[in-house]
Amino acid sequence: MSFPAKAALALLLLLPAGARGEWVHARGSTIFPPEISESEACQQAEDRATAEAIRRLTGESFESDEAVLCTETAEEADCNRHALIWTLLGGEIHATRDKTLEVQTVQDVFRQCVVTFDADIQFNAGKPDPNFTLGVRLSNAVYRSGESLSITLSPSQPMVVQIFQWLPYEPGDGQVLRVFPNRFDDATLTDKPTTIPDQKAGGRYQLTLLFPESQAKGRKVIEEYLLVVASRKPLALRASYSLADFNASIAEIPLQDRRLVRRAYSIARGSP
């Protein structure tokens, strides 16, 4: 078995009708050079303000090991954009008020756009259960195209687990693909440390990573993600989603009844 390799990025914020809302103050800023337009920079500042406001309510954060991985192996700008998208998917802005925008000159050459507003943020129902957690460890952080990975799961209590691959560069329903369970291995209920593929299934399939053929020839490393969904009860999730549809489906599950863990990894292009 192999992970498909594809292309592109899409973002749509969707939440179920029962999502909760709360007003918070949002502030974001971007320092930009002359070649970047003011409108583009201020949009980035507004996105950062939105992400920070949502992060304060949901607790979503960009994990330190992922930040290091982006800096050392992949294109940091792409990683940062993916982190921002992931945070935004924890909630959405329902309404805003008292918005301000200010552009200042910094160090003679650069400018800074600062955006502030009060935001009514709709976010997922429920509160995470600190006793319902899942440790997820990958066999490596960086892989050569054609190498296989394994995933070690460490549950805090019995739970049902499904694993998806997020391809940020892939459009439409090919963005999020289920890799476990699969036709070779369907044992999703776990209550003890488990490695996927396990020894019994390891001889029947492998999780092989391939560098996307669609990427520019000059690009040497690409970043992808695993999304591990743990729930108290079985979930009838589809085999493939857009990221927006995947988030909408997960958001329908109260936070206390599930845990969603993201892990980043990089794939290095093989020899020409």
Image (cartoon, rainbow, N blue to C red):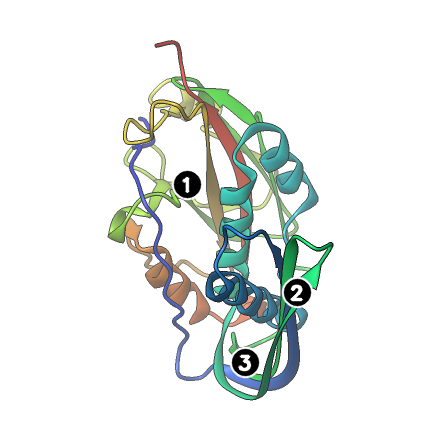
- Residue at (45%, 23%) from the top-left corner? 220
- Give percent across and percent down for residue 161: 47, 48
Mark pair 3, 2: CA separation: 14 Å
Number of numbered callouts drawn: 3
Residue under label 3: 121
Q: Secondary structure at mark 1?
A: loop
Between disc 3 and disc 2, whose residue precedes? 2
Foreground tag (3 vs 1): 3
Label 3 Cα crowd, 10 Å radius (few <14 / some 14-19 / many 20+):
many
Q: Secondary structure at mark 2?
A: loop
Foreground tag (2 vs 1): 2
Closer to the camera, 240 or 191? Answer: 240
Q: Taking 78 as reference, is 267 above or below it?
A: above
Residue 264 sits in quarter: top right
Foreground tag (3 vs 2): 3
- Give percent across and percent down for residue 12: 36, 65
Q: Is residue 199 left or right of residue 255?
A: left
- Residue at (65%, 82%) from the top-left corner? 24
Residue 154 visible within the image:
yes
Residue under label 2: 59
Which quadrant, please, contains the C terminus?
top left
Q: Taking 259 as reference, is 147 above or below it?
A: above
Q: Taking 165 as reference, is 127 above or below it?
A: below
Outermost residue to the front? 108
- Give percent across and percent down for residue 218: 39, 23
Which disc number belongs to residue 187? 1
